[in-house]
Amino acid sequence: MTTIFFIVQGRRLEAQALLLVATLRQHNGDRFPLIAYVPDGPEALAPPTRDFLDRCGVDLRIPDPAPRPWKKPYVHGNKILATASRRGGGHGLFLDTDMVCAAPLDLAPWQDDSIGLVPEGIASWGAENDRWARAYAHFDLPIPTDRVRLTRRKRAESLPYFNAGMILFPEGRFGAEWLETALDIDHDLRIGGKRPWLDQIALPLTLKRFGHRYSVMPVEYNFSISQRAPEPEARPAILHYHRFRFLADWPQYAETMRAVEQAAGPLHARLMVEFAEELAFEADQPGA
């Protein structure tokens, strides 16, 4: 059994959650339990959001607390807290909320004892100077000899570096170890560029510190379309749109909004579609 979970906090993520949940249910039915982690508590959600998530059978939870706070506020850390929270056995699949499911998910090939990941698109941290060497040395680790191929632009070869928007893992110790590593880096490693990249810095270090194997999943399972022209031949399973305006340019947009309408039910369909579009577009405005 694989449980899919994500974060809902604030108006932008509420709007995005409608799209993610509707498309997960459209393409997968009830095959996967869904959990929305709400750091501010379920009562903070707008009534239409809460009604929609309830209709779709989403379990609302508050993440388990961290053993100590972040050195500075770090909203991205909520995904690490959620991953470290207790869910039981099987596998967990964390998804960033700014995603939609575009096809039925076949996770079986990666449901083993490895961590399933898709490499980052570009070397957004550590591409220059000795940052990675210093980070590994902080944990008394050698620089890894394995390499991954980044997924965008020149698709350069890189030290292990992954997009933390999609992580498939066996439930157990991984989440707590990722949290421990991220907190250590945040408090005790003097290095630049921790915000917002701390989650992605800590991820490969966690793998090496605690001896986790990783499996590189197809890019279609974390297919980024930020600043990317529509590609009619692309067949993403999970489309990572980042901003609503990017999704609106892709053919998956119309199917996504139909999924919201279908999941909402006849009495709430128009309200939910308008709510999703209003909040998502509002969140894309400068300063939002």
Image (cartoon, grey):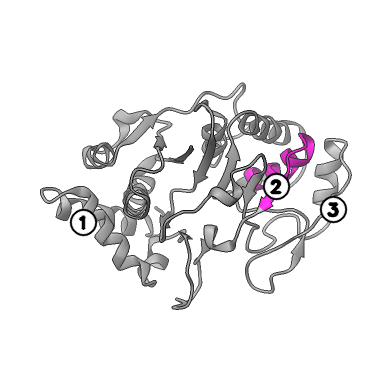
At which x and y percent is residue 77? 56, 37
Q: Which residue is mark 3?
A: 130
Give the amino acid at mark 1.
Glu
The question of residue 236 being in magenta is answered with no
Q: Which residue is mark 2?
A: 214
66 relative position to 287: left or right: right
Task: Give the number of callouts.
Answer: 3
At which x and y percent is residue 246? 42, 67
Residues under labels 3 and 1: Cα distance?
Answer: 48 Å
At which x and y percent is residue 151? 64, 66
Figure check: 88 above or below 29? above
Q: Residue at the far top: name it.
A: 67
Q: Nearer the viewer, mark 1 or mark 2?
A: 2
Q: Residue at the far left: name it.
A: 267
Q: Are marks 3 and 1 in contact (CB under 8 Å)?
A: no
At which x and y percent is residue 249? 38, 72
Q: Main secondary structure of the magenta part?
A: helix
Tell me which label, 3 or 2, sits earlier in the chain.
3
Q: Are marks 1 and 2 in contact (CB under 8 Å)?
A: no
Where residue 274 is drawn, which disc sits there?
A: 1
235 relative position to 55: left or right: right
Q: Residue at the far front: name it.
A: 108
Residues under labels 3 and 2: Cα distance?
Answer: 24 Å
Tell me which label, 1 or 2, sits earlier in the chain.
2
Mark 2 secondary-structure assignment = strand
Magenta span of residues: 198-215
Task: Using the image as rendered, state which of residue 228 and residue 286 is in the foreground.
Answer: 228
Residues under labels 1 and 2: Cα distance?
Answer: 40 Å
